[in-house]
Amino acid sequence: MVAIEPRPRDPQSSTGIVHCTLCQLPTSHPLTDDRGRPFCCTACREVDALLQQEVPVTAPSSEFATAGHTDSTVLTLGGLWCASCAWLVDETLRRTPGVVDVDVSFGQQQARLVYDPERTSPSRCARQVRRLGYRAALPGERLDDEEEALFNRLLIGGIFAMHDMVLGAMIYGRELLGWATADTAWLVRIFQYMMLLGAVPLLVVLGVPIIRAGLAGLLRGRPNMHTLVALGALAAFALSVRNLVVGSDRVYFDTASMLLFLVTVGRWLEMQAQKSGRDAVTRMERRIPAQATWITPDGNRRVDAAGIPKGARVRIGRGESFPVDGVVVAGEGDVDESLLTGEATPVTRRAGERVLAGATSLDGEFEVVTTAAGSATVAGQITRTLHDALWQRAPVERLADRLSALMVPVAAGIAGLTFGFWAARSGPDAALLHALSVLLIACP
C-alpha cells in the first residue's frame, strides 16, 4: 500500500494561508504535529492523532486496481442518524486493512466497498461497523424494519414524555402563578418522584439505542452526535436524581425526556422522507415492463425490453405500459404519462407522436418504433440520476460532515471549561447546571 503524503502547504508569500490536514479548512495560523503537518485547531490535531493511532491512512493500491485482485460488495447499514454517522462509518472502513475504496451513502443507508479479498472480507468490514454501535448486513441478509421498531418505541416513549411534561408544567405553573407555598411542598415532591418513574422507562426505550451508539463512538475515540445527545440527556437525568436525593426543588427529568423524544421524532421523520424517496424510485422502476413484444418478420417475440435495438417495432396492448421510448407508427388512444410528468389527465397519442417508457396505454393498441431502451430511456435516465443524487454529496455537505465530526469534542470541551469557570466562582452545583446548559444547547 502507498501511504498518503501530507497535504503540502499552500504558498505563503502573499496570504500565508494553509489548509488543515484533517478538515481541509483554510487557516492563517496553523498548529503542527510532530510530523510538521498543519491543522487549523487543537481539536483537528487531536482527532487526527486518535485516528492515526488505530491504522495509518492509506491510499488505494494501484497494484490491486490494475491486477484485478479486488472484489466489491454493498453493506446495508442501519442506525445512521445524521451525516456524522456516515462520515464515521466511512472513515472507519477506509482505515480497515485491505479496504481499497469505500463510499458510504447516508441517503441510501448503504456502504459500497472495494477490497482485497486476501486481506479482508465483507464480514470483517461489517463487524467494524457494528463495533461503532451501528447495524450492518451483508448481501442476502436483511435488517429488521428499523422504521417500524422506531415507531413502536415512539408510541411508548411518547406516553412517558407527555407524563413528565404535564407534571413539569404543573410544577412550573405553580411557581409562575404564585401558588408556591410551604403547605403544598409535599405535593411537588410527589410529582418529582412521579417524573422520575416516567423518565426511567423512557430512558430505556428511547435512550438506550442513542447511548449505546454514543458510547461506542466515545470508546473508540470518535465521538459523534449520538455522544452529544447521550451526554446531554444523561447529565440532565443524573443532575435531577442528585437534586432529588439532596432535597433540592430543581429537577430536569422533563428536559431529558423531551430531548430524547424530540431527537427520536426527528429521526423517524427523516426515515419517512428517505423511505418516500426510495419508494418513488422503486415505483418508477416497476412501472417499466421488463419484457416487450418485438414485431419481427417471423412473428411477435417476447424479449427482454432492455435488449430491444433502435429501430425495432414494438407492440403495446390495452392496459399495458410502454417498455421503450419511441414514435407511434400505428394506433391511437389515451395514454397515462403521470409517472413521468405528474399530470393526471390522460393525453391522446397517435401516429407520428412520441411516447415514453413507463407511460400506460389506457384504451388503445400501439405499434412503436424504438428510439431508446433500458437505461437509455427518459425514465431510465431519471432513475439513474436519482440514484446518483443519493450517492453524491455537494461540497457544502462534505464541509458540514467535517465540521459536525468536530462539533462533539468542541462542545464537550466548552462544557468542561464552563464547569471549571463556574465551579471556581459559584460552586459545583451552579457549575454543573451551566455545563449541562451548554451540552443541551449543542444537541442537534
Image: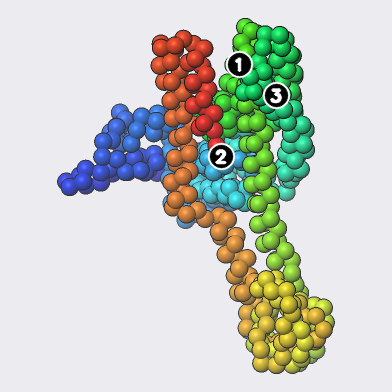
| Vertical arrangement, residue 127 with respect to residue 306, above or below | above
User: Which mark sits nearer the N-terminus, 3 or 1?
Assistant: 3
Furthest toward the top, the residue is 246
- Residue 216 drawn at (x, y percent): 59, 28
Residue 220 visible, this orientation: no
Foreground residue, 104 or 419?
Answer: 419
Residue 170 badge: 3
Which of 292/177 is in front? Answer: 177
Name the residue type under label 3. Met
Residue that badge 1 annotates: 250
Provide residue 123's location: percent of width, then percent of height. Answer: 64, 40
Q: Is residue 239 left or right of residue 298?
A: left
Identified at 57% across, 26% down, the residue is 232
Marks 3 & 1, CB-CB < 8 Å contact: no
CA separation, marks 2 and 1? 34 Å
Q: CA distance from mark 2 to mark 3?
A: 38 Å
Give yes or no for contact between labels 2 and 3 (Cβ–Cβ under 8 Å).
Answer: no
Tell whether 58 sits left or right of 174: left
The residue indicated by pointer 2 is 85
| Amino acid type assigned to the residue bearing label 1 in the image | Arg
Q: Residue at x 32, y 43 (%)?
A: 26
Task: Name the secondary structure under disc 2.
Answer: helix
Q: Position of residue 115 (x, y in %)?
A: 55, 46
Closer to the camera in the image, 290 or 259 = 259
Q: Residue at x 63, y 70 (%)?
A: 380
Residue 370 coordinates in the image, percent (x, y): 66, 84
